[in-house]
Every structure is written in C-alpha cells, then in structure tokens.
Image (cartoon, helix red, strand yellow):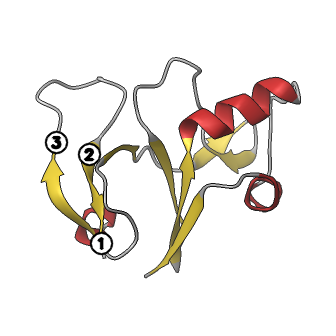
Amino acid sequence: MKFEDYLIDIRKPNKPNLGWDIEGIIKDRTNQPFKFDLKPIKKIKGVLGKEGYFNKRADKMVFEYSDKYIVLDVEELISYVKKNKLKIVQMKELLEKLEWNIIINK
C-alpha cells in the first residue's frame, strides 16, 4: 500500500517543490491534518538515508521500509539534530530519543 492509503482528507500541493508532498490525517492515529515529506530513502555517500533541510515546510517526515512506514515529527527531528550537532543519525536512535513517532505496518 502507498502511504496515502493510510490517510483521509488528502490534499496535494498545487505547485511542485513546496517542501511537502501530501497533506492528510493519518487514519485511526491522529485527528489533525499534517503535511508530509515523502521523499524516498536513497544511497547517500554509500549509506542508505534521507537528506533533510532545516527550512522544511512539512510537519512530518515519512520513511518507507518494505514492511512499514515510520513517521517522525520534523520540528522535533531538527531540534534533536541541532542540539546534538549531528550530520548523520540512525533510525534506531531516532525512535529511542524522539517522543513523536508513528510506525504504520503495511
């Protein structure tokens, strides 16, 4: 299933490159709409990952794995990265350290 299949009240940006890919409410998980960054995980300097920027307009960042989606709060993620002066973080660390995350099994 695509990530948008887990959303209701879907809205897509009217222009490309607005810093988010889709807006909606996660079914049975949240009651407010969020803007999601759906950029795929790719190889960066020989390691699988996802590049991010501090000027994102998305509320949540979605990581797609073969069996699940992991959704992280962008503001909390940026704060954690800045506070700890990190350039690279592992998903396991983020799931342990960040308070706002949702795992959606496919």
Type of the residue with mark 3: Lys
Q: Secondary structure at mark 1?
A: loop
Which numbered disc, 2 or 1, marks the residue closer to the eye?
A: 1
Does residue 51 appear in this view?
no
Sooner in the amino-acid sequence: mark 2 or mark 3: 3
Q: Quadrant of the N terminus?
A: bottom left
Write the residue at 31% across / 61% down.
31
Check residue 18 in the rendering and tell me which mark sits there, or answer none: none
- Residue 101 on image: x %, y %: 60, 59
Which badge, 2 or 1, comes first in the chain's sequence? 2
Q: Amino acid at mark 1?
A: Lys
Residue 18 shown left or right of residue 103 in the figure: left
The residue at the far left in this view is 14
Near mark 3 (Cα within 10 A), the count class, few <14, some 14-19 or many ≥20, is few
Query: Which residue lies under the disc numbered 2?
Result: 22
Residue furthest to the right in view is 84
Q: What residue would you read off at disc 1?
A: 27
From the viewer's perspective, is residue 33 above or below residue 5? above
What residue type is disc 2 on? Ile
Q: Splitting the image into 4 quarters, where does residue 103 fall?
A: bottom right
Label pair 2/3, CB-CB below 8 angstroms: yes
The relative height of residue 21 versus residue 33 in the rendered view (above or below) is above
Residue designated by label 3 = 12
Query: Which percent across, then down, holds residue 58?
Result: 41, 34
User: Alpha carbon of mark 2 to alpha carbon of mark 1: how far?
Assistant: 14 Å
Question: Which is more foreground, mark 3 or mark 1?
Answer: 1
Q: Nearer the viewer, residue 96 or 62?
A: 96
Q: Residues within 10 Å of mark 1 (few under 14, many from 20)?
A: few
Residue drawn at point x = 44 percent, y = 39 percent: 59
